[in-house]
């Protein structure tokens, strides 16, 4: 009978250890999920900021070209030609 009691005690102690390990792992998992969520938010914000900065950079390039800078002059001409084509297309649509 004493052997059975010892086995039960051993099983109980092992079960307690397993439950403690499960709790610990759940806490770790929870904290990691929170960290992932925070990092995802940071990445989204940085992506939006990058997009805004890219647009500002393009605007600055065009503005610089219009002010007489030799750099990006070709790009500016292409952009102006594209805008003129769009305006011509709109005018054609309106006159129909």
Image: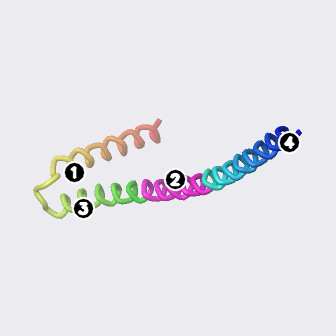
| Lateral position of residue 41 relative to residue 86, left or right | right
The residue pinned by badge 1 equals: 76
Callout 4 secondary element? helix
Does residue 86 appear left or right of residue 72 in this picture? right
Q: Position of residue 64 (x, y in %)?
A: 20, 62
Position of 37 with respect to 74 (left or right) is right
Is label 1 in a helix, a strand or a loop? helix
- Distance of label 1 from label 2 (alpha carbons): 37 Å
- Identify the residue at horizontal 60%, vertical 57% (top origin): 31
Depth check, mark 3 against mark 2: the one in front is 2
Residue in view at x 26 percent, y 61 percent: 60
Q: Report how far apart the C-alphas of labels 1 and 4 lie in the structure.
A: 92 Å
Nearer to us in this view, 60 or 4: 4
Asked if labels 2 and 4 touch by Cβ distance under 8 angstroms, the answer is no
Which residue sits furthest front? 2
Whether pointer 4 and pointer 3 mark residues with C-beta atoms closer than 8 Å, the reply is no
Q: Name the front one of labels 1 and 4.
A: 4
| Residue bearing the label numbered 4 | 2
Examine the rendered structure and indicate whether residue 96 appears above or below residue 61. Answer: above
Q: Which residues are magenta?
A: 31-48
Residue at image position (10%, 56%) is 70
Residue extending farthest to the bottom is: 67
Instruction: Tell me the tag on residue 63.
Output: 3
Which residue position holds label 2? 40
Colour scheme of the picture: rainbow
Where is residue 4 drawn, in percent x and y? 85, 38
Residue 58 lies in quadrant: bottom left
Q: What distance separates the C-alpha of mark 4 from that of mark 3?
A: 90 Å
């Amino acid at each position: 009978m004493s052997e059975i009691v010892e086995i039960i005690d051993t099983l109980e102690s092992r079960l307690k250890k397993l439950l403690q390990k499960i709790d610990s792992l759940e806490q770790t998992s929870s904290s990691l999920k929170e960290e992932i969520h925070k990092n995802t938010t940071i990445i989204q914000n940085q992506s939006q900021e990058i997009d805004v900065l890219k647009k500002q950079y393009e605007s600055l390039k065009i503005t610089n070209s219009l002010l007489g800078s030799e750099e990006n002059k070709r790009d500016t001409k292409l952009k102006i030609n594209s805008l003129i084509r769009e305006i011509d297309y709109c005018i054609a649509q309106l006159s129909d």
